[in-house]
Image (tube, grey):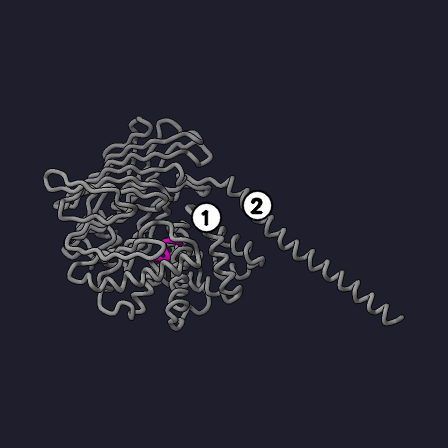
Amino acid sequence: MRGKMLWAAAIIAGVICAACFLYWDRNILLGKEEKALAWEQEAENRRLFPHPDSTWYDMELTLDAASGIIYGHTFLTTRNTSGKALKELWFTAYPNAFKDKKRTPAPREAYYAGFDEGWLKVEKIRVNGITSVFVEKDVNILVILLEEMQEGEDIKIEMEWKAKVPKASYRYGYKEGVFMLSYFYPMLNVLSEKGWHKGANYPWGEPFCLPTANYRVKITVPAPYEVVATGKEIGTIMRKGQNKEYHLEGRNIRDFCLAALVGYQKIEGRNRIADIKVWAPKERAFWAKEVLTEASSILLFYSAVFCSYPYDDFKIVFVPMQGFEGMEYSGLIFLQERFLQPGFADNKKAVFILAHEIAHQWWYNLVGNDQMAEPWLDEGLADFSAYKYMTGVRGEKALDRLQGTVNLGKGLKDMASRKDYYQTAYYGGEAFFAGLEEMLGEEMVYNILRSYLAHYKYDIASREDLFYIIEMESGKKLDAYFASWFKE
């Protein structure tokens, strides 16, 4: 009798435990579902201006290589998706950072022939057919709207402008038959709940917060030049007077960058996800084959663990650039020429930099962020992604990492030096995600990053958005861990 009672008690206890487990498991599931529903509701109320679905840049450009001047005509169409009436618009005019010798972001060694100014001058702006008043403010242009633009109203902006490219081996500059044209045109700034995200001038980092948009571009260059640019080349036309006209188009891209080259050779290949093209000076183009092979491997790895690469092709251009070892743009990167040498695959630093710059196609290009206020978000993730490639695919020994924490709450304006910038945004940002992996495991971190991409693709994300995704996917409260990295 006693045995039967014990057996019955055991069964009852088992049923109770199972019920508790199912209740607990259901609550976890419901909690995650509730968080997902809350996010969807928040997303519906989230306002992004300009919105990628309704924003097109149509640009006609002419490069006068002799004077280093770009003549531009921009017809920009968008829609007021800000949730309020607009009384003004703000644009970034990055070339104006190069006006003053004392304030130029380019290092002294970039000016191979002494200081040479760069600038951008807007000559006329019309908004919905009405000539508008505008004011240049450092690297920003304020456009005062004579009539308020209501929520949902279409906005058509026409601009005539010209930009001077300095003789400088820099991301915006010219040297030895190579024009490096980054952020060279008037770019409409982001307006969020925090206000306008205006451009700035800092000697390190990317002082931008760029929205995703769509581009149709026609550029005319002297015939000897070859144009490599963001987006697809739709066609080329030879014009009288020995000029060549390129027609280009890009959808869902965060910036439009181009290089105009003389004396270069293209090496190309393909993997199952994209055409890969590398441009290098002709005398060293043979060495670009190793770069192409490594780039193909990196793209395949990131597409497998994060999400598919978003474009049909990926471009790499080796340029005479100082101040940066590499620079990222939508579907395109610049690399310093010094990395183009025999044995590229054996040069761990060069491969890491290549992996870092390619990672920006996911962290910056697909998921945007305010690179002035939170540079660690994209730079830290790009470094962490490169680290995962180096150890996971190439089997490299893990490099020494930052010990302890840094203050990731610092923006570019709070950083005292280039060293401080790298220590915070790159090494600190990578260490944040490495610490997360130690707590949650590799596969959970990959799940988090895939969710982060799914939720904020073509959007502007903040650290709060990332934290929300981390806690939602992991089911853990990590306030203490987050707080250890932010000392504000």
Q: CA distance from mark 2 to mark 1?
A: 15 Å
What percent of the width, then of the height, locates residue 236? 20, 42
* Callout 2–callout 1 Cβ contact below 8 Å: no
The answer to whether residue 203 is left or right of residue 151 is left
Does the magenta stretch mainly form a helix, a strand or a loop?
loop
Q: In the image, what residue occupies the spot 32% across and 43% down?
A: 250
Q: Viewer-proximal residue, 32 or 89?
A: 32
Q: In the image, what residue occupies the spot 23% across and 54% down?
A: 170
Quadrant holding the N terminus: bottom right
Q: Which residue is mark 1?
A: 456
Q: Answer above or below: position of 458 versus 316.
A: above
Q: In the image, what residue occupies the spot 39% across and 36% down?
A: 54
Q: Viewer-proximal residue, 362 or 420?
A: 362
Q: Which residue is mark 2?
A: 38
What percent of the width, then of the height, locates residue 80? 41, 34
What percent of the width, then of the height, locates residue 437? 49, 64
Tell whether position 244 is magenta. no
Q: Residue type at mark 1?
A: Tyr
Assess disc 2: are there few (<14), some (14-19) or many (≥20) residues with their C-alpha within 10 Å of its C-alpha.
Answer: few
Q: Answer above or below: position of 16 versus 261.
A: below
From which residue to which does the magenta span run?
A: 358-363
Q: Residue type at mark 2?
A: Ala
Q: Quadrant of residue 418?
A: bottom left
The answer to whether residue 20 is left or right of residue 345 is right
